[in-house]
Amino acid sequence: MSLEDLDRFLTLRDSDPDLAQALAQPMDLDRFLGLAAEHGFALSEADVFAAQHANTRRERQLSFSRIKPPNHAACAISSTADHHHV
């Protein structure tokens, strides 16, 4: 169906403790899709793979945003200070 349907299905665990418990257990893709179907969602392998891909891209972007450029000014100051103590 769509990523929105997948999100709606996963949001159900907030109000359905049995679903939350089931989703907390390891399962293969067929079982996950079957569980979604039991709750009225016609999800496909493509939906799950698209969500995984989108999640991976989001995580990669977050990782890149956390990388700080080197502080060259601090390096230059410490290098200069070292020369004065020789």
Image: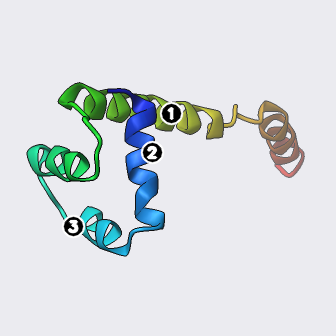
Q: Which residue is mark 3?
A: 25
For image coordinates 82% across by 41% down, the residue present is: 74
Which numbered disc, 2 or 1, marks the residue closer to the eye?
2
Kindly identify the amino acid type of the residue bearing the numbered disc 2. Answer: Arg
For image coordinates 37% across by 39% down, the residue present is: 6
Left or right: where 32 falls relative to 54: left
Residue 55 in sight from this viewpoint: no
Residue 1 is tagged as none
For image coordinates 38% across by 48% down, the residue present is: 9
Kindly identify the amino acid type of the residue bearing the numbered disc 1. Answer: Arg
Disc with the residue nearer the chain's start (3 vs 1): 3
Q: Residues within 10 Å of mark 2 (few under 14, many from 20)?
A: few
In the image, residue 19 sits, relative to residue 86, either above or below, namely below
Which numbered disc, 2 or 3, marks the residue closer to the eye?
2
Q: Where in the figure is residue 34, as x and y percent of width and height?
A: 14, 48
Q: Which residue is mark 1?
A: 58
Q: CA distance from mark 2 to mark 1?
A: 19 Å
In the image, residue 30 sits, relative to residue 17, either above or below, namely above
In the image, residue 37 sits, relative to residue 56, either above or below, namely below
Q: Which residue is mark 2?
A: 8
